[in-house]
Image (spheres, helix red, strand yellow):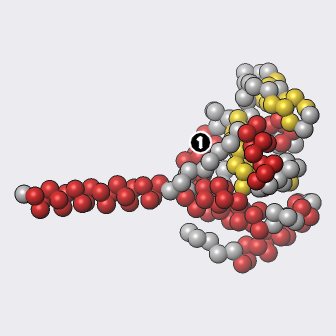
Amino acid sequence: MTVFRSSILFTFLLSVINLSLSLGQEVEWQSFEKAMQENTSAQKMIFIDVYTDWCGYCKKMDKMTFKDPKVSSVLNEKFMPIKFNAEQKEPINFNGNEFKFVANGRRGYHELAAALLGGRLSYPTVVLASHDFDVLLPIAGFRQKEEMHMLLSFFSSHADQKDVFSSQETFDKKLTEFRETYKSPY
C-alpha cells in the first residue's frame, strides 16, 4: 500500500511541476507613473499595451499572447512593459503636462491615450517608445504570440536605431529584412 501511495504522490508532484513550468513567468506590467520613475535608471525601451475594459481582443491578447512564456520573457528582459487603460479616470502628469479623462458619449477617453495613438483610438494597440518616452510606433490590432515575439525581437535588436522608425516605408523595409533571418522559437 505504501508503494501505491508513493507512486500516486510522485505522479501528483510531477503534474504540479509540469503545470508550473508550462505557466511560465508573467509580464511584470508597470503603471505609467511607476515606469517613468523606474526607467530613468533602467534605460529600457518602453512597451505600452493600450487597452480598455470592454475590448474583447484586448482580453484575448492578455490570455493568448502576453501569457506566453516566450513573449513575457522578452518583454520583462528587454522592455519596460506598461499596461495603460485608455479610459482611466485618473490624470497623469507626463513631460510637464497633465493628461485627463475626457467624457465623450457613453464612455470617453484619456487624453494620454489619444496622444500616444495619434488620435486614432483603436484597441488593442501597442505603442513602442524609446527609453526617454519618445513614441516610435503604435501598432493597432490583435497579435498572436508568434507575431508578437517576432516584433519584440525586431524592436529590441533595433533599440538604438531611431531611423528605423522614421517612416512607415523605412520600418516596413527593415522589418521585411529582419523576417528573412528571424528564427522563431515556436
Query: Where residue 42 appears, x then y in whole percent?
Result: 76, 53
Question: Residue at position x 86%, y 36% from top?
Answer: 94
In the image, 66: left or right of 20?
A: right
Residue 40 visible (yes or no)? yes
- 26 relative to 99, above or below: below
Query: Where residue 68 appears, x then y in whole percent?
Result: 55, 56
Question: Residue at position x 72%, y 51% from top?
Answer: 80
Q: What element carries label 1?
A: helix
Query: Where residue 145 appears, x then y in whole percent?
Result: 60, 58
Q: What residue is shown with label 1? A: 59
In the image, 65: left or right of 82?
A: left
Disc 1 marks a residue whose amino acid type is: Lys
Front residue of 47/151: it is 47
Query: Where residue 78 appears, x then y in whole percent?
Result: 70, 59
Quadrant location of residue 148?
Answer: bottom right
Front residue of 59/91: it is 91
Question: Residue at position x 85%, y 64% from top?
Answer: 160
Quadrant location of residue 119?
Answer: top right
- 2 relative to 83, above or below: below
Other-residue count near label 1 (Cα within 10 Å), few / some / many at <14 / 14–19 / ≥20: some
Residue projecting furthest to the front: 41
The quarter of the rendered structure image containing the C terminus is bottom right
Quadrant location of residue 96?
Answer: top right
Question: Residue at position x 45%, y 58% from top?
Answer: 22
